[in-house]
Image: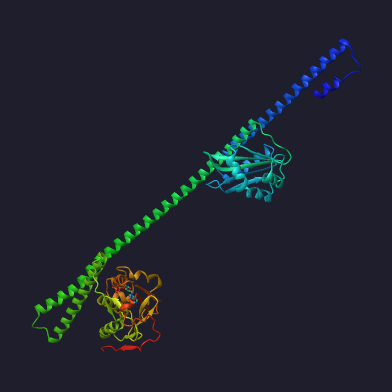
Amino acid sequence: MRRFIKRKLKKPGRLHGPLKKAYDELDKTARALIQTDLKLHQANERLNLQISQGHALHRLGTFINSTFDIEIIMQTVSESMAKDLDFEKTGIVFLDKKGQKPMQSCYTGFSSAEYAHLLEHFGSLIGPALLQEEEVCLQTASYASGIWAKLLRTLSLASLIILPMRFKSRLIGFIVAGRTHITLRLSEAERRFYCMYASQASSAIENARLYEALGQANLTLEEKVQERTHNLIEANERLRDLDTAKSNFISLISHELRTPLTAIKGFVMMLFQHDKEISGEKRKIYLSVLNQETDRLTRLITELLDISRIESGRMEFMWESISIPDYVRKILGKLSLEAGGVDLEADFPENFPSVMADADKLEQVFMNLLVNALRFSQPGGKIKVRGWRDRAGATLEISDQGMGIPFSEQEKIFDKFYRLDNDVNRKNPGTGLGLSICRALINLHGGRIWVESEPGQGSRFLISLPLNLDKTANSSGVPSLHPAPTQRYAEGA
Ligand code: ADP
């Protein structure tokens, strides 16, 4: 229209009087029309922009509110800035909890080097700008100076807007959008629009983050519930095992108590009722059985009392400095009477240190280990007790050449009432308390006891005891390298 009016109103040659006046009037009207048309055009452009911005906001809102996936939301925001709002280079950055470090980001149009360069300026340039500017930070190549100008040049941008994303006034991230050739100038309405845009993106991202956190919390909760359930199942199983062990124990103890008692009662009755008919030889045999069965009963009751004392913390100790080799030799001497063809051997270096211990308790431990070793040894086999000094203190080893213990059972045999199901055990009733008492006693001496064994290759029970060097016979502190000559105990010696 402007062009049309200009063409029609080309100034004619010379005009006079009323004609000139009419022409001037017409010219004035034409100019006013051009002005109005221009304004209309501008208003139309603004309206179009507002409509497309409104559309962009609507599309963005519809899409990002339909997902909780932060990656997708970020990608949508970045692409929407490029597609719907005509920015050639866009990006969106999600910051860490303190709002001090970029955590996750997505970009469109920037090269990876450009984007990395932009993010490098977060701490020095963008971060402080976001804290200063309340809504929109606009930088243009024509007006920017210093680092901003350099940054715009490196990014090949004519204008760059940075929109802070805030959630409950906390800075959670920002959006960057740049135009390569147009120097942007933002009207108040446009500023408001970008503000709304960033706020839409912030709530979508924060909702997604909360959703993610909720999912994580749910997962953790589920894991915790599963863990607790598992623990409860385990505890329940342990209780059931304990209950079974207790029932087994009661029936075992009843049996163990009844067997010697029945034998004792039977032989006593026999001696009472047939006193005169029993020969001197038979009497001796009966009395020896009575003696054995009484011993068995005493042992059982002692073990039960020991367990009860240890568990209630009532076990008393008589601490003294003792020479283990002497004790071992004494015990081996006693045992050699019932070794049944098994060779008993002690092997200690001459300067083996004395240890602070309760002699009776230590003897009880050795007795238990040696009686077990004898039980599992064949005639002609060998049981050896060795000792040496090492960093941990004194280590003692009781080894046999018996049937050995499967690896899977090696810890369990130290449990109360635990016995392996094998021919030897079937022929020799026991309580399964001995090793648990040994472990408790050695632990109370500040030491450790464990077993090393291979089925068919015999077993090695090892005891490590701490040393109180001040109390040792030889307190040089130097481990001995020269073992003393081996000493043998013949059966019946
Ligand atoms: P008990 O002697 O009453 O059976 P212990 O607690 O002393 O109880 O021993 C537990 C189990 O450990 C034994 O029943 C046996 O199965 C196993 N055990 C102990 N010592 C040896 C050994 N030297 N060789 C093979 N098995 C052994």
> Horizontal placement of 238 versus 79: left or right?
left
Q: Is residue 127 above or below residue 240?
A: above
Total marks placed: 0
Quadrant showing the N terminus: top right
Quadrant showing the C terminus: bottom left
Q: Is residue 68 above or below residue 474?
A: above
**Of the pair 311 and 457, the residue shown nearer to us:** 311
Q: Residue furthest front?
A: 146
Q: Which percent across, then down, holds residue 401?
A: 37, 82
| Rendered residue at 35%/59% (across/down) | 237
Q: Which percent across, then down, holds residue 130?
A: 59, 41
Q: Which percent across, then down, holds residue 55?
A: 64, 32
Q: Is residue 41 above or below residue 329?
A: above
Residue 204 visible in rendering: yes
Q: Residue furthest right?
A: 13
Q: Which percent across, then down, holds residue 405?
A: 37, 75
| Rendered residue at 85%/15% (across/down) | 23
> Horizontal placement of 327 versus 50: left or right?
left
> Horizontal placement of 270 versus 41: left or right?
left
Query: What colour scheme governs how the chains and residues are painted in the rendered image of this protein?
Result: rainbow
**Of the pair 34 and 277, the residue shown nearer to us:** 34
**Of the pair 393 and 70, the residue shown nearer to us:** 393
Q: Quadrant of ligand 1?
A: bottom left
Asked where in the image residue 339 lies, by quadrant, the reply is bottom left
Asked where in the image residue 284 lies, by quadrant, the reply is bottom left
Q: Residue furthest top?
A: 18
Q: Is residue 10 above or below residue 422?
A: above
Residue 72 visible in rendering: no
Asked where in the image residue 72 lies, by quadrant, the reply is top right
